[in-house]
């Protein structure tokens, strides 16, 4: 057995006083061997990123520090290393890639120069330009000579992450730390980056410490897994073993909470149609007086139908126009063309003043639970606001709010509290209660579970399903995640570049995706080999 | 930490807020209790006692006309503090109104902000002198002259906050709930501009007090008979070498007031307005 490149032994990092717990991480031990991918999996607050920062010596100074244990990089103790020594090690012996490649790159320098800077900082001797171009080729960037001179905003998200990886690997570090490197990327791009990391690990022989919240990603890339919860290691072992026979309840729960790629059985008895869009389009115009005008067709002639008690999933990657469709239906933006029929009344062209009646019938839940509630108003004030706009007396609205809050699984006493006193999942429940208070016919959920931890996500999905059936709602469910769509939706519309490329019953789309793009999406789902690919579903059906 | 209770509590623990606020409270108390703290009428001319040095009789001495300097300083605090407070409140109100409308009503944005740009292009002090000399100096016109040039800055600040907050999902949710525009502005957007406004208000108050003193000093301000700090300093100018206390006493109070307000403003900014606050702790280099 080769010596580990990274050995973390019983490391604790203390939190400043007044935190919700005394330690950010407590007695964490793990090892990474050369050429091995070790995944740290955990939900938010599990301490997985703090562990990575502790290794890199990047803990926020004065707030967090390693209080015990040892971190050794190739035998060298890091917890006692000087700032200068750590600086020398970073980039050369260990390097890191981050979640958001746009903010991790400097927007005012060409990316090639930024990669070269790593060489310059470490006084690398040799033909720097050639080395950079070779690395860009290694990370499969097309046309390195051209991309060398490109600025970050001119590249796609996937290309930016490849630049970051090139920058991280250019000095052949022994250890690469990847902190949720694919979370901000589209699913097809994510699959490519994961494949790239796997290849590079063999080519460059670096040990990879990969931080993720997604067990699908773990199944795809990890050789060994470390499951963390509340700053402690819950379970560690070979990935195969942990995924197949998780020992700890927490691991079992996490794995069980990953939506399986098995479409829900088709339900019959479609109710009355409440929503139909006919050729809805949305154009955005850019430029103006001094620049030539440019038109972006965000949504292009979209036809959808939705009935009571039914969930229609709109699935697509970023820029596909799925959210724009939702916002047109909710009339938060005005569609450029086409008709939106709600109960056979065209609302697409209604002027804003006449929308009051429509607003009540269409309610929306947003992605970011931290920004969907006004931080300066109590939860109760937020929930009664809608009904009171429509003339419901305050006392009645409050009574109803209490019932609804309890319906979504939160104590009625929550009404007097402010949003910051709730967790992300609880806030999303409160947003659902706020939407329900309007007694809508159509509920639009725009990536409503995307920002949530997987266990919370499962609970909110169950809640959405439950209220849809209880209130006989028509639900428009916007998501980038086919696994989530499979779990909840009766029918799915797949969008790409503003167009609906395929629509059909969920089971049918999963069994026989007709459009190439749909197939591509399926192929890119992390963990598909483990939790059912389209082919497996077909064999079951 | 976005809740108003917790941020208020945080603010009250900030050393800048405690120190600045404490000094300011003392000054306000001094201004209010001026008749009790001084034995002399600040406007009473007693040439017999002119240019007396500070001592037991006259705590801070007397000026050229024999008026008690301590008494003029204490009564002058009333005018200075009132002008600072009034100018801040008026500039904030007017600027907030303009900023809210410009930020939320797209049709009016261009027009309103160009007017603000125009106002900003004129140096504030010149505009103030012009306004005062046009209408004659009274408390009202001096305040007007001080707060009008401050409006564009407040309007721009509020507009920029409105532009970012109007895109927040909770505002979209409110639109979806059928909330009328004026309630969206009042309930959802205005409260979220408050921290920045409070901070901006302290800076306006400090600069208003300075500008008032400056206007008095150059003779464009309130009537020289009124006991303001600026007037007192202006009158002491000719005899500074013989009787420096006439300038030093009101000057020290002026400096202390402005410093206290600014220190408090910095403390409030750090606790109430995280957008402007310095980061706590360092980032590894």
Image (spheres, rainbow, N blue to C red):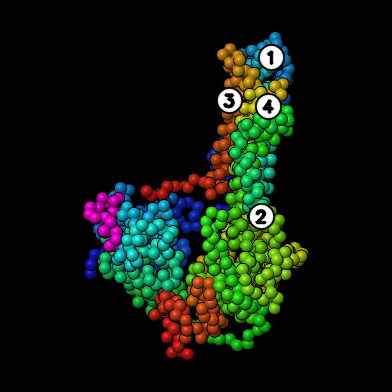
User: What quarter of the picture does the N terminus of chain A occupy?
Assistant: bottom left
User: Which image quarter: residue A211?
Assistant: bottom left
Q: Are marks 2 and 1 on the same chain?
A: yes
User: Which image quarter: residue A516?
Assistant: bottom left
Query: Which dot marks residue B252?
Result: 3
In percent of width and height, residue B71 lies at 68, 22
Secondary structure mainly formed by the magenta segment: helix
Residue range (magenta): A118-135
In percent of width and height, residue A239 lies at 35, 74
State which mark lies toward you, 4 or 3.
4
Q: Which residue is mark 4?
A: B221
Calculate the distance from the C-alpha at mark 4 to the C-alpha at mark 3: 20 Å
Calculate the distance from the C-alpha at mark 3 to the C-alpha at mark 2: 49 Å
Proximity of marks 4 and 1: CB atoms separated by less than 8 Å: no
In percent of width and height, residue B109 lies at 64, 51
Disc 1 sits on a residue from what chain?
B
Proximity of marks 1 and 3: CB atoms separated by less than 8 Å: no
The secondary element bearing badge 1 is classed as loop
State which mark lies toward you, 3 or 2.
2
Work out whether A14 lies above or below A432: above
């Amino acid at each position: 057995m080769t010596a580990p490149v990274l050995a973390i032994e019983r490391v604790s990092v203390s939190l400043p006083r007044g935190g919700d717990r005394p330690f950010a991480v407590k007695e964490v031990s793990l090892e990474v061997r050369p050429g091995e991918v070790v995944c740290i999996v955990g939900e938010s607050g599990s301490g997985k990123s703090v562990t990575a920062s502790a290794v890199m010596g990047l803990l926020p100074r004065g707030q967090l520090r390693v209080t015990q244990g040892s971190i050794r990089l190739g035998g060298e103790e890091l917890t006692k290393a000087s700032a200068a020594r750590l600086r020398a090690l970073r980039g050369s012996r260990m390097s890191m890639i981050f979640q958001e490649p746009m903010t991790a790159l400097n927007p005012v320098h060409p990316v090639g120069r930024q990669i070269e800077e790593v060489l310059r900082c470490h006084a690398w001797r040799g033909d720097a330009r050639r080395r950079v171009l070779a690395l860009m080729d290694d990370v499969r960037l097309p046309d390195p000579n051209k991309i060398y001179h490109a600025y970050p905003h001119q590249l796609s998200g996937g290309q930016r992450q490849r630049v970051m990886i090139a920058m991280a690997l250019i000095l052949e570090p022994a250890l690469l730390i990847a902190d949720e490197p694919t979370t901000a990327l589209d699913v097809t791009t994510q699959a490519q980056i994961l494949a790239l990391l796997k290849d590079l690990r063999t080519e460059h022989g670096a040990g990879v410490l990969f931080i993720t919240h997604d067990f699908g990603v773990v199944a795809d890339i990890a050789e060994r897994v470390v499951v963390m919860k509340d700053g402690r290691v819950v379970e560690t072992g070979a990935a195969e073993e942990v995924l197949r026979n998780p020992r700890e309840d927490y691991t079992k729960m996490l794995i069980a909470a990953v939506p399986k790629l098995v479409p829900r059985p088709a339900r019959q008895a479609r109710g009355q149609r409440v929503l139909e869009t006919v050729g809805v389009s949305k154009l955005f115009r850019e430029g103006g007086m001094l620049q030539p005008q440019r038109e972006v067709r965000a949504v292009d002639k979209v036809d959808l139908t939705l009935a009571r008690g039914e969930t229609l999933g709109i699935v697509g990657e970023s820029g596909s126009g799925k959210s724009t469709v939702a916002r047109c239906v909710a009339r938060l933006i005005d569609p450029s063309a086409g008709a939106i029929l709600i109960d056979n009344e065209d609302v697409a062209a209604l002027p804003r003043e006449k929308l009051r009646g429509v607003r009540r019938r269409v309610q929306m839940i947003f992605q970011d639970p931290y920004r969907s509630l006004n931080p300066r108003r109590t939860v109760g004030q937020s929930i009664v606001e809608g009904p009171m706009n429509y003339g419901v007396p305050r006392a009645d609205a409050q009574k109803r709010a209490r019932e609804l809050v309890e319906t979504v699984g939160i104590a009625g006493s929550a009404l007097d509290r402010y949003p910051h006193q709730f967790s992300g999942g609880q806030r999303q429940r409160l947003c659902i209660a706020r939407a329900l208070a309007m007694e809508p016919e159509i509920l639009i959920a725009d990536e409503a579970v995307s920002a949530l931890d997987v266990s919370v996500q499962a609970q909110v999905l169950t809640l959405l399903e439950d209220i849809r059936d209880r209130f006989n709602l028509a639900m428009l469910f916007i998501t980038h995640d086919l696994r989530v769509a499979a779990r909840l939706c009766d029918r799915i519309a797949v969008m790409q570049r503003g167009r609906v490329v395929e629509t059909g019953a969920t089971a049918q789309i999963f069994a026989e995706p007709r459009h190439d793009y749909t197939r591509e999406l399926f192929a890119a789902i992390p963990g598909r080999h483990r939790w059912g690919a389209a082919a497996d579903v077909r064999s079951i059906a | 930490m976005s809740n108003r209770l917790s941020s208020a509590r945080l603010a009250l623990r900030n050393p800048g807020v405690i120190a600045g606020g404490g000094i300011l409270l003392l000054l306000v108390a001094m201004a209010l209790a001026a008749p009790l703290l001084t034995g002399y009428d600040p406007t009473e001319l007693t040439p017999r006692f002119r240019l007396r040095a500070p001592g037991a009789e006259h705590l801070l001495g007397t000026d050229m006309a024999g008026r008690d300097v301590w008494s003029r300083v204490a009564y002058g605090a009333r005018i200075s503090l009132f002008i600072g407070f009034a100018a801040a409140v008026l500039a904030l109100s007017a600027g907030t109104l303009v900023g809210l409308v410009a930020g939320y009503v797209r049709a009016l944005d261009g027009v309103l902000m160009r007017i603000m740009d125009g106002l900003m292009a004129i140096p504030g002090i010149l505009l103030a002198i012009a306004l005062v000399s046009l209408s004659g100096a009274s408390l009202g016109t001096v305040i007007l002259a001080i707060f009008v040039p401050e409006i564009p800055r407040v309007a721009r600040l509020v507009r920029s906050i409105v532009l970012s907050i109007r895109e927040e999902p909770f505002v979209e949710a409110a639109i979806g709930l059928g909330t009328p525009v004026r309630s969206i502005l009042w309930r959802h957007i205005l409260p979220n501009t408050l921290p920045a406004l409070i901070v901006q208000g302290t800076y306006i108050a400090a600069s208003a007090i300075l500008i008032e003193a400056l206007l008095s000093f150059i003779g464009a301000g309130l009537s020289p008979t009124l006991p303001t700090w600026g007037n007192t300093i202006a009158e002491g100018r000719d005899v500074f070498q013989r009787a420096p206390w006439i300038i030093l006493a009101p000057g020290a109070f002026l400096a202390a007031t402005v410093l206290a307000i600014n220190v408090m403003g910095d403390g409030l900014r750090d606790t109430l307005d995280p957008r402007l606050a310095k980061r706590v702790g360092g980032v590894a280099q």
